[in-house]
Amino acid sequence: MSEEVKNTEKKAEKAKTADGAKPAEKKPAPAKEKNAVKNQKPKNKAAGAVKHKPAGADKKVFSRLPIQIAYIYLAIPMYIFLFGWLRTPIALVMEAVLTAGLFFAFRTAPKMDVTQFTRSNLPKLVLMAAISVIWVYLSGIGEFAFQNFDHMWRNAILEKLVSNDWPVIITDSEPYFQKPVTMIYYFALWLPAACVGKIWGLHAANVFLFYWCVAGVMLVMTLISGLLKKVSPWIVLAFVCFSGLDAVGDFVLHNSSGYLWFTSNHLENWAPGFQMSSMSTQLFWVFNQAIPAWVITLLLLHQKDNRSIIFVYSFSFMACTLPSIGMLPILACIGIRRIIQMYDKKKIFKENAIAIIREAITIQNAVSGLLLTLVSYLFLKSNSTSTDGFRKTEMKRLLMSYLIFVLLEFMVYYFAIYSKKKREPLYWVSMATLLVVPMISFGPHIDFVMRASIPALVVLFVLIMSALEESRKAKEIKQYAVIAVLLAFGGLTAYHEITRSVTTTISHSTDPAVAITATEIDLFEDGARNNFFGEYEDSFFFKYLAKK
């Protein structure tokens, strides 16, 4: 080989090294091999092809609107109270304070998960609304169906608000009082209906009250669905039926199968000295306290920060005074939990403290919330003739009753959801609240334990429904079955309340002599007048704030 040819070959090899050798072209695989590869199943999920969901399938949708509507629902009665009871200059200032608080609370309202509130879920939403309407109808609100004994006073309160000027003052109070008296009560829920009644009469007021309460119950169901991130008629039915095991307690203590099974008896007062009311009993007997307490408690559970918690809580005094006391531990738990979340260990204490204070000291909290609380407190404190205050329950005498009561009324639920919820602070705080409130009495009866327990029972319900859903998803059949059975036995209380309403209402339709409306009374002439009226002339509220 000549020297020239050798040099040419070396140059060619260098060029290949510099440019990189071109890979040989692959021949197309035979059709059989292609089909074999296509039909081959992956050995595991990781090796398999990724299934692409439709665009937006996992997209979460959030909205402030449900929370903002709930704020308005609570604020409307407060606007009416301020305008109807305060002197005009003071009323205008307080109306402005309330409006400012509402404005800032609107801006910082937490966003609720409304992913499930879609057109495809419309049948479920309609059914949820229908159950709510039927439930309120059967409660006796509006005088459409049978009314339990306590409606005697509820109807009389609305009548007094409709037929008298505001503030409601009775100058000729003898022989019951020595001085003129005024109506002092937590009557916020009735005020919108009373406004309607002043224009169109008492019947129109009752009709409007029915729709106002329907709106409140629908808000409750919406807020619960938002917390659980689920839309289902079963949630509404579970809330309607939620109760302690009253039927079992009645059977154990009174040894009567008539209490355990399907009758129309009132089961709630089975434990001597104690009572915590089911959700249906609350609505059917004390709707004026129950609905606002439900709404306010659920709003507090929705709060993501401390910017509006005092503002939300301030509505409870004029709407549900005794539940507002039971709400305090829940309020504290939510506030402290947020402070712990905010605390940054990388920052110095001063920086953390400033950030925490800035979040809590807002217009709606520090100005609107505190002033609304102060005005409400001064009004309710004006009753100088009320002498029954707080006292300890006689626990030595009622110890055995207490132990059976707390076990069957709520501890069975806490035991059932312990494994799922033991790490949640509200699990322990709500339990402690329910254990403590029976030990405190206020007034001559057991009203405090019945009403102060309402917020903690709402929290317990949310925890139970959350644990139930977690058990279902984890296919933990035993735990799911235990919770479901407890809820079913608890539902016997609601069954008795609803059965009494249905049967009596049907009897009235065939025999008008069967009364469904509670006995008509004059609120002032009734023996329980001290619960609603009191001498007021020496009080700060009526001296300096109220209309003359």
Image: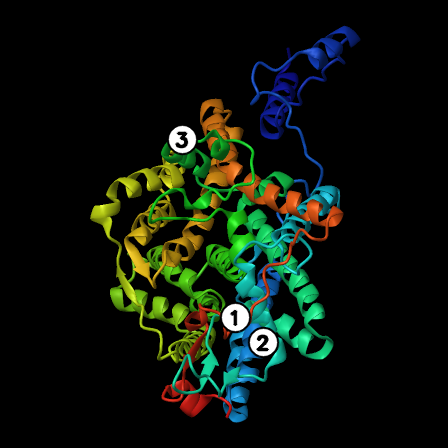
Given the current orientation, which residue lies at the most extreme top position? 32
The residue tagged 2 is: 161
Q: Earlier in the sequence, mark 1 or mark 2?
A: 2
Res. 343 image quadrant: bottom left
Quick one: which residue is furthest to the left in this view? 396
Task: Tell me the element at label 2.
Answer: helix
**Residue 458 image point, x, y percent:** 47, 50
**Looking at the picture, how far across and down is residue 62, in whole percent?**
61, 54
Asked if disc 2 and disc 3 are in contact, CB closer than 8 Å, the reply is no
Q: Which mark is residue 255?
A: 3
- Residue depth check, mark 1 versus mark 2: number of the one nearer the observer: 2
- Residue at mark 1: 187
Amino acid, disc 1: Phe
Label 1 packing within 10 angstroms: few (<14), some (14-19), many (20+): many
Q: Is residue 154 above or below residue 95?
A: above
Quarter of the rendering occupied by the N terminus: top right
Depicted 454 relative to depicted 526: above or below? above
Residue 166 appears left or right of 352: right
Q: Position of residue 32 (x, y in %)?
A: 76, 6
Mark 1–mark 2 contact, CB under 8 Å? yes
